[in-house]
Amino acid sequence: MATKKKKIEWVCSECGGTTVKWAGRCPHCGEWNTLKEFVVETGAAARFGDSRHKGLVSASEVLDLNDVQAQEVPRIVTGFQEFDRVMGGGLVCGGVSLIGGDPGIGKSTLLLQVMHRLVHQDVRCLYVSGEESPGQIALRAKRLGLEPQGLRLMSEIQLEKIEATLLEEKPQFVVIDSIQTLFSDQLESAPGSVTQVRECSARLTRIAKSSGITLIFVGHVTKDGSLAGPRVLEHIVDTVLYFEGDTHSNFRLIRAFKNRFGAVNELGVFAMTDRGLKGVNNPSAIFLSEHKANVPGSVVMVTQEGTRPLLVEVQALVDTTHLPSPKRLSVGIDQQRLSMLLAVLHRHAGLACFDQDVFVNAVGGVKITEPAADLAVLMAIYSSLRNRSLPEGLVVFGEVGLAGEIRPAPRGQERLKEAAKLGFSRAIIPRANAPKQPIEGLEIIAVDRLSNAIDAIR
Ligand code: TYD
Ligand code: MG
C-alpha cells in the first residue's frame, strides 16, 4: 500500500496566502513573520481534492453587465430593530455573516434571541454549538424567557456531520457558534488553526450559497480585538460584524465592519439586561455622562456612525507629569492621532503639553474612528489644561489638519439636527459645514482655523 504522503504548506495568518517555502515575509500581503507551517493534505484529503477548490459562487459565462438583471436581495426581517439596522435592513437570504467579539460579550445570547424571533416567523432554524452542550443552551433560553419550540439545536464540531445535517434538515437559517471550534476530518491540523478555519468556513459558505441558507458564524477575537484566524475568513463572508463596548458597562454596540448588502460602520446599540439584549432607541443619551453641571475637560461631539448621528462625550485630563516622557493615553480614540493633535495644538494654538500627561476617553465604551473627533479632543484638552469648563449646551465636531485648518465632516446637517433635537444650543463646527438656513435653537459658530475655535471658547 502506498504510504500516506504529507504535504507541507506555509500559510500566512494575516491574508491566508500560501507558499511552498518558508519566508520571513509573506509574498502576498507583505507582512513579516506571519507564515506558519501546516500539514495540508493527507491521503484522504487528496481523494476529495477537486471539491476543495470549487469557487464560492457558481461560475458564469462572460456577460454584458447591461444584460444582467439586478435583483433586490430578499431579506428576512427579524423584527429585532437594532440588529436589522446593522445588517442593512434584515438578514439577506443566502448571505453569510461573521460576528466577532470578546468572550462573554453576548454573541451567543444575541444569536439565540434572533433565532427565537425567526422561529416565530416560521423560518426553519438550526443552532450548531461547538462550545456549549444542549443543556447549557436550554438554560440560557430559559433565562432569556424564550419559548424553545421549533428551535433546532445541535452540539457538534465535526464539519462533515454538520454538512450532512444541513443537507438533510434543509434549514433556512443557521448559526455556527463558533467557527474556531469546527474541524474537518480531511485535514490534520488542530481545530482553530488557520487551515481548519479557512477550510471549514469556505465549505459551509459554499453550501449556504448553493442552497440559499442564511448563515452566521461566530468568530473568536485575538487580544488586540481583531478576528482570530486567517484574514481570508473576512474576505469569504458577505458581512462582518463586531461586538464592541466594555464588559463592565451594560451597553453593547454592534458595528458592521464590512457589508456587501448595506452600509458599513452602521451601529446597533443594545443594553444587556437580565433577560438578554434589548435594543436602545435613543443611544445618544447613553454616551453623555451623568453629571449635570459642566466640568473642565469634557465636551460633547456629534459623531456619525453609519446612517445615524450620535452624541458622545469626550473627556480629557491633562496633568503635570513626573516622568521623563509624558503619558499619552486614549480610550476609544486613536492614540497616534492624539499625539499628532497635541503637536498641532502646540504649533497652531501655542498650547504646549510636553510637560503634561494627557488622557483622553470617549464615554460609554464607544470607539470613535472618524477624524471628525479631532476638534472635540482638542477642546477637551484645552478645557482641562486651563481648568475651565466649556460653555453649557455646546457641541463640536470637525477634523483638524496638520496646518491647523479645520476641515469639514461628512453629513454636517444631520449632525447639527441631532444636536438641536437633544437640546444643545451652540455648535462649533467647520466653516464648510455651516448650514445655509439657520437651525432653530442652535447658534452656529463656524471656524476655519484651530486658533479661531480656541478663541471662541476663551
Ligand atoms: P454570551 O452570549 O454567552 O457571550 P459570548 O457568546 O459572546 O461569549 O454572554 C454571556 C454574558 O452575558 C454573561 O456574562 C452573562 C450575560 N448575560 C446577561 O447579563 N443576561 C442574560 O440574560 C444572559 C443570557 C447573559
Ligand atoms: Mg458564546
Image (cartoon, grey):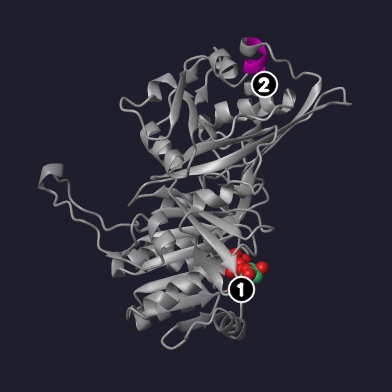
Secondary structure of the residue carrying tag 1 is loop
User: Which of the two labelled residues, at mark 2 and mark 1, occupies the earlier sequence position?
Assistant: 1
Tell me how far mark 2 sits from mark 1, CA to CA.
43 Å
The tally of labels here is: 2
Establish if 153 lies above or below 280: below
| Visible residue check, residue 122 | yes
Q: Quadrant of the N terminus?
A: bottom right
Q: Amino acid at mark 2?
A: Leu
Q: Give yes or no for contact between labels 2 and 1 (Cβ–Cβ under 8 Å).
A: no
Task: Give the residue displayed 52% in from the left and 63% down from the top.
Answer: 218
Nearest the viewer among 101 and 369 is: 369
Task: Estimate how packed mark 2 is, as few (under 14), some (14 to 19) or many (20 or more) residues with alpha carbons within 10 Å.
Answer: many
Q: Amino acid at mark 1?
A: Asp
Is 342 situated left or right of 186 in this image? right
Where is residue 325 drawn, in percent x and y? 82, 23
Is 292 situated left or right of 163 in this image? right
Which residue was labeled with disc 1? Answer: 274
Nearest the viewer among 226 and 108 is: 108
Segment colored magenta: 342-347
Q: Quadrant of the C terminus?
A: top right
Nearest the viewer among 229 and 252 is: 252
Ligand 1 within 8 Å of the CB at mark 1:
yes
Task: Estimate how packed mark 1 is, as few (under 14), some (14 to 19) or many (20 or more) residues with alpha carbons within 10 Å.
Answer: few
Q: In the rendering, which numbered label is found on residue 44?
A: none
Secondary structure of the residue carrying tag 2 is helix
Establish if 326 lies above or below 146: above
Which residue was labeled with disc 2? Answer: 342
| Visible residue check, residue 7 | no
Is 181 situated left or right of 425 in this image? right
Where is residue 123 drawn, in percent x and y? 33, 78
